[in-house]
Image (cartoon, rainbow, N blue to C red):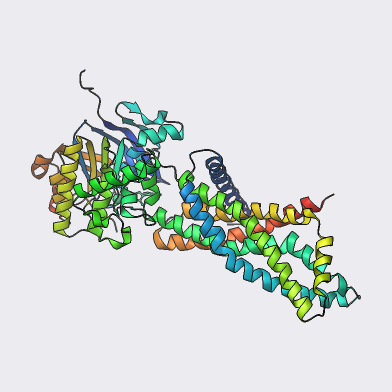
């Protein structure tokens, strides 16, 4: 095979995948915005995607906030700008690191779990069984996960924002000698509501990506236990990459004035 | 009112290929109302694909599927699909119970999620259905993982019959069970099909099971139905494929591909 053929073939493969992901996403969205809804399933997913992710998201945020504070303080020191550290930390966390880190933790925790669960259901004919029991798998399995992720990732991000800023605050006040009240005041006066909102909008999009990748790869899993393993890996990797890509696109839209 | 003359289920000229591998090559299978047809055939001959096409889980490349005289290709919306599926019950090869739900929730799944029967009533009906397949009410709150393979098959059977389907499919109902449990399942299948008066299509390579649950037997080989006749004729079919399969001989017209 010559190089041109190879490039052509992989381009076609990529387009085919993009097409089938788009169709899957369309069916998922259609099932999410119309009744019947499976409230019980949705509640279960809100707990497992949202609530149970709080510890990992919180821990990630506190350490990242603290490390960010140290780095910016040191970097800022090179041109005597240590004092604006609280503002930079707050901006970096709300606009960028809060939503991205929360989404990455969810890509690992949630995409994988969704892909494994739905993939195992595919392998053991449970998805076929849903059909024969007059229940649309997109309504019963896919929609509750999409909805739960889109609703809870912004909430997790709000938590990550708060804890991340608190991490910076702790380092600043405990080791860098900042005054507590002043740190809070600086952060508060500096941040605009758009800084926070734009991060939360990103988070909703990332939530959709994370749940979609898990569901897509799980639903299309084939080939028994190995297929489920492969689906899980693909879900995590594709969710992470798409989160970064979406992050860049959204950021460039949000910053274009 | 006169009985309709069309078959309850009919596959007409069904073809299905995966890539360049032709699995079904023009299969015609009519099944009369209230009859039980067993499809036999070697591994990989397309028995499961046949059932998946009949039940609408897979679309044929060409050919039609009629249910009660209606061409299933005319089903468009998901609501129509759900109503159509309400006529079916299916027992899957591995039972395919939902492992996140208890046994009674599994059995009552269609009642709760599709038919919107109140939970209390659905639970009562599920426990009744479990009793019919010989499972005590004490298993109702267990999860599938806590049941043996034979018990899971019974629960799967209860789930398939709880909403009184018109057509019921059995995919290798006895595979993986010991001979005694296999016979219990066969008896339960015969009993439930008779009680409901429904049309049944089973696939199996277990001849004891085929003889017991089938009114008729059809053999699928190389994408075609090579023989079909009353179950009683299976031992003197005069068909070399059937003879070789029934007697389990290595030599004959069927070549095992390795
Ligand atoms: N979704 C699919 N994609 C590709 N090939 C498939 C698919 N489903 C079935 N096949 C192929 O079709 C052929 C028939 O499969 P099928 O499962 O119907 O066999 P079977 O008669 O039920 O065999 P067994 O007794 O082993 O269950 C097999 O060769 C299988 O590899
Ligand atoms: Mg099979």
> Quadrant of the image for the N terminus of chain A?
bottom right
Of B10 and A181, nearer the camera is: A181
Examine the rendered structure and indicate whether residue B187 appears above or below residue B215.
below
Examine the rendered structure and indicate whether residue B208 appears above or below residue B239.
below
Image point 36% across, 51% down: which residue?
A125
Answer with left or right where residue B213 lies relative to residue A161.
Answer: left
Image point 63% across, 71% down: which residue?
A59
**Residue farthest toward the front in the current orientation of the protein:** A181
Quadrant of residue B12 within the rendered picture: top left
Image point 28% across, 52% down: which residue?
B93
Answer with left or right where residue B72 lies relative to residue B164.
Answer: right
Quadrant of residue B221 within the rendered picture: top left
**Residue farthest toward the right in the current orientation of the protein:** A80
Q: Position of residue A176 (x, y in %)?
A: 80, 80
Examine the rendered structure and indicate whether residue B193 appears above or below residue B3.
below
**Residue A217 showing in the rendered view:** no
**Residue B239 showing in the rendered view:** yes
Q: Position of residue B36 (x, y in %)?
A: 19, 38
**Residue farthest toward the bottom in the current orientation of the protein:** A175
Q: Position of residue A227 (x, y in %)?
A: 44, 60
Image point 82% across, 80% down: which residue?
A177
Of B68 and B15, nearer the camera is: B68
Q: Position of residue B211 (x, y in %)?
A: 13, 45
């Amino acid at each position: 095979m010559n190089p041109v053929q190879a490039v052509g073939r992989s381009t076609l493969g990529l387009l085919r995948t993009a097409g089938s992901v788009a169709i899957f996403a369309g069916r998922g969205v259609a099932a999410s915005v119309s009744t019947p809804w499976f409230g019980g399933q949705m509640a279960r997913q809100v707990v497992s995607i949202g609530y149970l992710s709080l510890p990992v998201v919180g821990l990630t945020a506190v350490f990242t906030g603290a490390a960010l504070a140290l780095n910016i303080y040191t970097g800022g020191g090179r041109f005597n700008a240590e004092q604006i550290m609280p503002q930079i930390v707050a901006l970096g966390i709300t606009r960028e690191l809060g939503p991205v880190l929360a989404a990455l933790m969810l890509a690992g925790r949630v995409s994988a779990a969704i892909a494994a669960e739905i993939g195992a259901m595919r392998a053991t004919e449970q998805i076929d069984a849903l059909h024969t029991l007059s229940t649309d798998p997109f309504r019963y399995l896919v929609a509750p996960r999409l909805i739960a992720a889109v609703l809870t990732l912004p909430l997790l991000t709000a938590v990550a924002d708060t804890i991340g800023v608190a991490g910076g605050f702790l380092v600043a006040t405990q080791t860098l000698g900042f005054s507590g009240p002043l740190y809070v005041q600086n952060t508060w006066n500096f941040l605009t509501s758009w800084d926070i909102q734009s991060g939360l909008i990103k988070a909703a999009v990332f939530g959709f990506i994370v749940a979609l990748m898990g569901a897509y790869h799980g639903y299309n899993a084939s080939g028994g236990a190995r297929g489920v393993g492969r689906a899980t890996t693909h879900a995590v990797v594709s969710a992470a990459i798409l989160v970064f890509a979406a992050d860049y696109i959204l950021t460039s839209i949000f910053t274009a004035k | 009112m006169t009985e309709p003359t069309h078959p309850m289920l009919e596959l007409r000229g069904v073809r299905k290929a995966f890539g360049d591998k032709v699995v079904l090559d023009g299969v015609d299978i009519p099944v009369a109302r209230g009859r039980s047809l067993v499809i036999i055939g070697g591994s990989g001959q397309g028995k499961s694909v046949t059932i998946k096409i009949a039940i609408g889980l897979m679309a044929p490349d060409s050919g039609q599927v009629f249910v009660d005289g209606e061409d299933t290709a005319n089903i468009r919306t998901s609501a129509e699909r759900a109503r159509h599926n309400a006529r079916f019950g299916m027992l899957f090869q591995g039972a395919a119970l939902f492992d996140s739900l208890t046994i009674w929730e599994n059995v009552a799944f269609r009642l709760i999620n599709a038919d919107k029967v109140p939970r209390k009533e659905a639970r009562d009906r599920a426990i009744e259905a479990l009793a019919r397949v010989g499972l005590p009410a004490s298993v109702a709150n267990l999860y599938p993982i806590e049941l043996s393979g034979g018990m899971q098959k019974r629960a799967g059977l209860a789930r398939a019959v709880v909403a009184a389907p018109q057509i019921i499919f059995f995919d290798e109902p006895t595979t993986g069970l010991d001979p005694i449990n296999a016979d219990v399942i066969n008896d339960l299948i015969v009993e439930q099909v008779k009680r409901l008066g429904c049309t049944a299509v089973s696939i199996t390579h277990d001849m004891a099971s085929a003889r017991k649950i089938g009114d008729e037997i059809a053999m699928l080989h190389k994408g075609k139905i090579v023989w079909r006749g009353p179950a009683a004729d299976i031992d003197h079919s005069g068909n070399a494929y059937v003879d070789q399969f029934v007697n389990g001989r290595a030599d004959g017209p069927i070549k095992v591909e390795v």
